[in-house]
Every structure is written in C-alpha cells, then in structure tokens.
Amino acid sequence: MKRILFVFSIAVALACGSVNDKQGCSVSTECPVGQYCATAGGESKCWPDPVLPTASAVSASCTPGPCLRDSVLHVQATVTDDKEVLDASVSLDLDSARSFPMAKSGPIWVADVPLRALPFDAFTKDVVATVIGRDGARNSSAPKSGAGVTVTRLKWTYNAAAPLTSPAVMSDGTAVVGVSAAADQVLAISASGTKAWSRTLGTAAAVVTAAPAVGQFAIWVGSEDGKVYAVALDGSAANSGVDLTAAVKGSVAVLGAGAKEWCFATVTSVSGTGFIGTASSQGESAISSAPAQEGFTTGPIVATDDRIHAPTANSTNSATLRTFELSTAPVSLTGTWTASIGKKFGAAIAMDGS
C-alpha cells in the first residue's frame, strides 16, 4: 500500500511540478496560453488551467426600439470562470467573422454594436448575437447565442386615409406624394415620418394618381382634372401651369434649363388621341398631339440630350415610341422621330445613360 501511494505522489509531482519549477508572473497574460497567474507559497507563479469559462444569458435589444438598420444593438451576457475572466467579445450573424469587444459592467458584460457598420442584405430579418468569453489563461468559452432580434429598414409608416402615389423625395428627405382625395391632394411627409404640409389643388376633381416630381423651382404634379400644377417647394402655393383637358395618369418629368425649368406630362383624351404638354416655372406652356386615336400609355421621360420620349398605342394595340423636342422661342413641342416598339404596354419607360 505504501509503495502504491509513493508511485502516485511521484506521478502527481511530475505532472504539476513544484512551485519552484513554475514561471514567475504578475498577471495571467504574462503566462503561456493555457496557464493563469496565481500566488502559492508567497510567490506569484503560472499554473495550468484546464477549465474553460462559460458564457450565458445572452440578450440583445435596441433603445429606443424597434431595431432599425442604422440603430445601435445593445448586447449583454454573463461570462463566468472558476478563476478569472479576461475578456469577452460579441459577433452578429450579419458578419460572423467580425467581433466587437465587450466591457464589464457589474456582474455582466456589455457591448453596443453599430448595425450600420455591418452588411444587411434584407429589408427585415432576425439578427443573432453570439458571445465568447476568455479566462486569464486565454481559454475560450463555447460560443453562446441569444434569441434573434428583428432588424428592419422600415423607419416609419404614415396613414393618409386615402390612396397615395409613389413618392418624390426632396434633398432633406421629405417625401412628397399625390393623394386621391378632394382636398390636400399634395402631401409632404418629413424624414421623421410626420406631416410637413399639404396643399389643395384647384377643385375636388383635382385628384392625383400620378407620382409628382421635384424640381429646382417647384414640385410638379399632374392631376386628373387635366392640369399640371407647380407647387412651391415649401407647399405654400400651387399654380396651374398647363391644361391638357384630360386626366394626367402617368408620372411627370422635369427638365432643368438654367434660371427656369420645364415639366412634361402626357394624357389621352376621351376620343383616344394623346396629348403631351409642358409648362415652365415662369408660366410658359405648350401642347402637342399624337396622331388621331394614338393615346399615350405612360408618362414621358427626359433624355440626357433634353429630348422628351413617351410611348403611344393605337386601336390595334400597336405601340410607338415618340420623341419630341422643346423650342423656347416661341415655346413649342415638336415631334421629331418615332420607332415601333411592338404591342401596347403600361409600364414606365427608362433611358439608358450610355
């Protein structure tokens, strides 16, 4: 029995060594990885540490909520060890290769992660935070993840209690929309989601179903009363620019021209003939027409060479792209060329800048 105990004590001594065999230290980071600094026999020495730390109770939230794409995500967790905790870090599944250091706050570890600093390839998705702690021996805990937190790009919603058009956005982030209503047919919503102003156009028939356009001098709006309106950029006034006598259902286009600008809109009359009109920020206007029973099917676009393009369709649904040029002395719109583009369509057209 004594021999067995003797052999065992030798084995322990060989495994752990004596205090004199240990490296001296003042803090654990001076020790080799896997060892921590502890005092034994009045001296601070490096000792093996086979026990891993533990991360738990991971949670994440935004204050104030909800979590937006550009919010700061507050993460907290508990990290424990039988001897000492050196540090902790957190990563998000948006980019798991990138981690953020956590700071000790009382009994927990915390970090504020700027979501804007990470990729976000969705409109709305649940984001998961994962925490790893390290002890003084630089042993890492098993990764611990918290519950997913919903992050969204949706900053606000606004209930206008009526159908709205697509928005035109001003340089300060204000969104301007047309409203299908008998009054306040132009509505501006601030970048924070609150009403900035509204403006009534003409009569109750001036319902707006086509997206407005923001220019340098005015907000241009086509209405179902057949008129194109120039609304002051601050919404303080609205002036009728040109009367096309039929409902403007397609979006309008704007051409800058130095000290003034021009707005273009298309309509189709009850007889099926299309008209294109323009109005300037200085009160000038002109109207041109397509051939009889050739109606415009979408709003116009302005190309980089200042030409105006818009598609029409005839009674057999054959479609034609029509191009117009603006002359200012005197003011007129002149058709210059056409191209057959197949069958009638109602989708908006776009210009390839190349």
Image (spheres, rainbow, N blue to C red):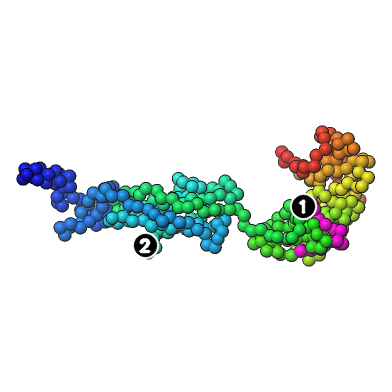
Work out whether 244 lies above or below 313. Answer: below
Q: Residue furthest left?
A: 2
Q: How far apart in space, not on screen, are marks 2 and 1 (Cα)?
A: 56 Å
Report the mark closest to the observer, 2 or 1. Answer: 2
Q: Quadrant of the N terminus?
A: top left
**What's the residue at 35%, 49% (across, down)?**
141
Residue 32 image position (x, y, % from top left): 26, 48
**Relative image position of residue 108 (x, y in whole percent):** 39, 60
Left or right position of 23 against 138: left
Q: Which mark is residue 88?
A: none
Task: Relative to 146, say whether 1 is above or below.
Answer: above
Magenta residues, dominant SS class:
loop
Q: Is residue 322 left or right of residue 172?
A: right
The mark found on residue 211 in the picture is 1
Q: Nearer the viewer, residue 106 or 173?
A: 106
Name the amino acid type tagged 2: Pro
Tell me: 32 left or right of 282: left
The answer to whether residue 162 is seen in the rendering is yes
Residue under the image location 68 percent in, 64 percent down: 194
Write the start and end of the magenta stretch as one range. Answer: 198-216
Res. 215 visible in picture? no
Q: Residue at x 84, y 55 (%)?
A: 223
Amino acid type of the residue tagged 1 in the rendering: Ala
Residue 308 placement: quadrant: top right
Give neighbour class at mark 1: few <14, some 14-19, many 20+ (Cα, 10 Å). many
* Left or right: 108, with 42 as reference point: right
Q: Earlier in the sequence, mark 2 or mark 1?
A: 2
Q: Residue furthest front?
A: 1
Q: Which residue is mark 2?
A: 107
Q: Is residue 203 magenta?
A: yes
SS at circle 2: loop
The answer to which quarter of the image holds residue 181 is bottom right
